[in-house]
Image: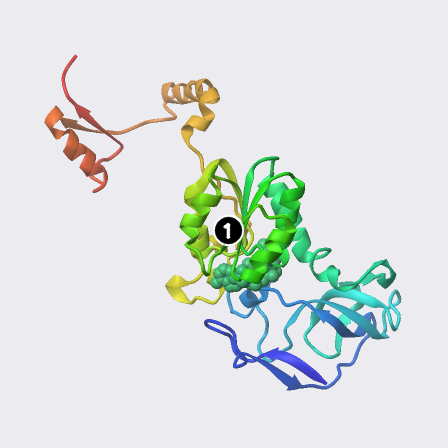
Amino acid sequence: MKEIHLVKRPETTPTNEHIQLVDAETPEQSEGEVLVKPLYISVDPYMRGRMSNTKSYIAPFELNKPLEGGAVAQVVESSHEDLAQGDIVTGMIPWAEQAVVPGDSVRKIDPSLGPLSPTLHVLGMPGLTAYFGLTDIGQPKEGETVVVSGAAGAVGSTVVQIAKIYGCRVVGIAGTEEKIDFLKELGADATINYKTENVKEALKEKCSEGVDVYFDNVGGDISDAVYPLLNKFARIIQCGAIASYNKPGDQGPRMQMHLIKSSALMKGFTVGDYQERFGEGLKRLSTWLQEEKLTYKETVTEGFENVPDAFFGLFKGENIGKQLVKVADP
Ligand code: NDP
C-alpha cells in the first residue's frame, strides 16, 4: 500500500523533494472508525499553506505522515454503526491508497443523486467559497462590474457564473488562451490573459466604468492593477493569494494573506461618507470637550511666509498635535 507523505517543508515551490510516495502498512481500525479507499482526491491551493510550519487557521501538515485533503472515498471495512462496506463518503481523508478515518468525520453521499466528483468542487468547498464570498461579501448588484482573478479555476469559474446570474458585467482574468475561451463560454463579458496582455492597460479598457466587486483569488501584481480602478463603495472579496504562496521572505505573503488568515475586514472610507451624521458627531465631540474628557495640542508656526515650511514639517514629524500657521491677529 502506498501513501503520499510530506517529507520536507518547501521554502518556495513544492516539488518531489518535499512530497513523496512511500510504502506503508494498511492501518488497523478501531471502534467508530472506517477503512476507506479514496475515489477522488481534491488538490487545493490552500494545502501549500499547510506545508509550512506557520500559525494559520488550520494546523500545518506533519512531516513523514500522509498529507490529507478533501476526497470522495468508498468504505472498505466499517467499525462505525452508521456506515457499511461499499458506502460512498466524503470528508478530509489522508493521501493513501487506503486510510482509516473516524466514521463521524465523513459524510455519506448518495451516488444515485448524480456524479460524485462535483462534491469536491461546485457542490463542495470551492462552490461554497464562491457563493458566500460573492453574495455575502460582494453584494453584487445588477449592472455592476465584477472582476474575478483566477477566474478559470474551481472557485473563480463558479464566481463568474454566479455574478452573471446576478446580472453583473463580469471581467475574468486567467493565464492561458484555453482558459480565456472557457471564460467566454461561461458568459464572461470581457477577459484578460494576464500572461500575454498588459493587465493594467487591459483592465482600464475593459472596466471603463470602474470595478464594483473584486473577487480576488490571486493577490500580487494582478490585484495591484485592479485597486486603482475600484469604484466608490466597491467590495473586495479577499479569497486567495496564490501568487504569493510559493514566494519566500519579503516577496512572500502580502497583506492579502493576513486578511485571509484572520478573516479580517478591510474597508476604505472618507469622512464625507458620514456627512449626514456630522451633526451627531459634532455634538458628541463638543460635549466631551466641555466635560474635559477630550483635550488637544497645537503646534503654531508664525508668519504667512512660513506656511510652506509648516507644510513640509508634517512629513518630517515636526508637529505635535495640530499644525497651524498664525498669519495675522484679528
Ligand atoms: P484553482 O482551481 O483556481 O487553481 C489554481 C489556479 O491559480 C491555477 O490554475 C492558475 O490559473 C492560478 N495561479 C497559479 N499561480 C498563479 C500566480 N502566480 N498568479 C496568478 N494566478 C495563479 O484553485 P481554487 O479555485 O481551488 O482556489 C482559488 C483561490 O482561492 C486560491 O488562492 C485558494 O487558496 C483560494 N481559496 C480560498 C478559500 C477560502 O476559504 N478563503 C477556499 C478555497 C480556495 P492561471 O492559469 O489563470 O494562472
**Is 76 placed above or below 196 here?**
below
Counting labels gives: 1
Image point (17%, 12%), residue name: 330
Residue 181 appears in the picture as rendered: yes
Residue 182 lies, in percent from the top left, at 62, 57
**Is 151 placed above or below 138 here?**
below
Image point (47%, 57%), residue name: 194
Residue 35 lies, in percent from the top left, at 80, 75
The residue carrying mark 1 is 259
Residues packed near mark 1 inside 10 Å, few (<14), some (14 to 19) or many (20 plus): some
Q: Nearer the viewer, residue 99 or 187?
A: 187
Position of 115 with respect to 314 (left or right) is right
Q: Nearer the viewer, residue 32 or 182?
A: 182
Image coloring type: rainbow
Image point (49%, 74%), residue name: 10
Q: Hey, which quadrant is residue 300 in on the image?
A: top left
Position of 191 with respect to 90 (left or right) is left
**Kind of residue at disc 1:** Leu
Tell me the quadrant of ligand 1: bottom right
